[in-house]
Image (cartoon, rainbow, N blue to C red):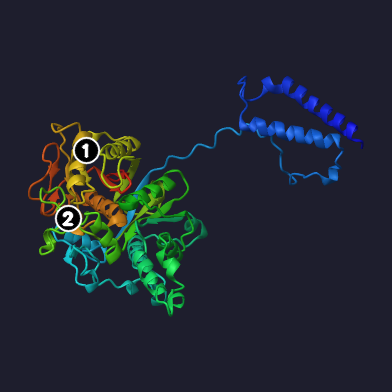
Amino acid sequence: MARGHRTLLVALGACLVVLNLISNGSQSSYGSQPVLGQAQLRTRANTVSSGYAAMHAIPASNAKKAPRGTMCRSSVEDFGPPPAAPQRRVVITGLGAVTPLADNLKDSWEKILAGETGVKRLEDVKFDVLPTKVAAYVKDFDGSKVIPKKDLKQMAPFIQYSMVAAKEALDDADWHPESEEDRQATGVSIGSGIGGIEEITDNHSEFLDPARGYRKISPRFIPKMLINLANGFVSMAHGLEGPNIASVTACATGSHSIGDAFRLIKFGEADVMVAGGSEASVEPLSMAGFNRMNALVTAFNDDPEKASRPFDAKRAGFVMGEGAGVMILEELEHAKARGAKIYAEIRGCGSTGDAFHVSAPSGVGALRAMQAALAQGGIKAEDIDYINAHGTSTPVGDAKEAETIVKLMGGPENEKKPYVTSTKGATGHMLGAAGAVEAIFTALAIKEGVIPPTLNLEEPCVTEGITHVAGKAEKKEIKCALSNSFGFGGTNACLLLTAPPA
């Protein structure tokens, strides 16, 4: 075809397109808005292109076709809103934990109520270079009681802790899905703050060996390091094929993992979730980093049991802890149908960001997280009986949290004056596992009607507007409780738990 004829045909095609757009533009689903959106621009481009192809008589056999049975749609067509998500109730039916107090929940809880502590002096010589000489570490742990020995070599300690806690929680809930339907409706949400960090340091040391460096790197290194492998191994051990996710939000990880699982059940993506957090953080590099931030306590090296003292005037930094906490969350009707025991109901999970400082809290974000959890659950602040506080034993953080709780309740003169304690006096700060373990303690407090104490609380930094329980547990009916977790980077999580539905 001559160049002149081709140019004429292109021009005619373009005119036809313009006329078509002029006649139909005001009929668009975008209304009379003169500014074109991206969808309209793409439509125009496609129309011009197809017009050009038609003018050049491209054979139909060469054109791309939609798959048989597929309806072709305009890119500007409105598909309408997605289906409304269900609003289902979520309850806690199983609990498990590995803590610095014991390798199971039963013994850990009994020691918490008795006022015992898991804080000990560091004995391994690898910690000798550190200013801090105390930690709340897991002692005499034997994962082979639950994990086959052939699998132990594939798992970093934080994964082993997860496996043991998950097995205890599943047994407690009496939930061992066998049918394909039940397995696919059961998921895992277990997070960690720093995962297999000692695997990184150990393999790096091997890699620096000039003679055998590369050959000394373990083929298991990557799986042992990855945080989501706690989920992976738990799901494989129990055949759980539902949602499989892992949160990493520093010290709020455990609570966010439970919150994620709560939402997955609430909105119908799972019926049962294995949820919690795990950490194996008592190792030299992690502790050195926190020491350099002046975050770890050094003032009680000769008196380890007194080192973690949340809300006390003599608090001087947190004690590094480790372990795992796992709970079984379940849709209410699913739990009732199989006759499961119910510890408590989760009614909300408030998640906010401070956008303020790497490590110092603003207080505003924490307040909004608590308010969000209450709003989700339809609960008023004056209905709160107990708050398991984040309370890490740091000078700034504890005071700010206590003041924020008082503000939530309406000020120092509020009539309720809820009970506020921090179990970190006994467990130390378990980082990514903390929120999960503390949510478990909160569920048990509701179930058994008892307030776990704050250890070493001799002179509270805030006394007005809240009620402290120091030294030993106190019997008290609890119908509504909050569990707070705040992390570096200004990430905040607050779980709202209430007594089981009637």
Residue beneath disc 1: 404
Image quarter of the N terminus: top right
* Residue type (three-letter) at the residue carrying disc 2: Gly
Q: Report helix, strand or loop for mark 1.
A: helix
The residue furthest bottom is: 211
65 left or right, relative to 398: right
Going 18% across and 60% down the picture, which residue do you hit?
110
Q: Amino acid at mark 1?
A: Thr
| The C terminus sits in image quarter | top left
Q: Which quarter of the figure has residue 279?
A: bottom left
Residue named by callout 2: 425
Q: Quadrant of residue 194?
A: bottom left
Q: Residues within 10 Å of mark 2 (few under 14, many from 20)?
A: many
Q: Secondary structure at mark 2?
A: helix
Relative height, residue 349 to residue 295 (above, below): above
In this view, the residue farthest toward the right is: 1
Query: Where does the image place residue 150, in percent across and percent down from the top left?
Result: 42, 77
Could you say where residue 300 lies in the image, as x and y percent from the top left?
A: 12, 60
Residue at 63 percent across and 26 percent down: it is 36
Q: Nearer the viewer, residue 477 or 70?
A: 70
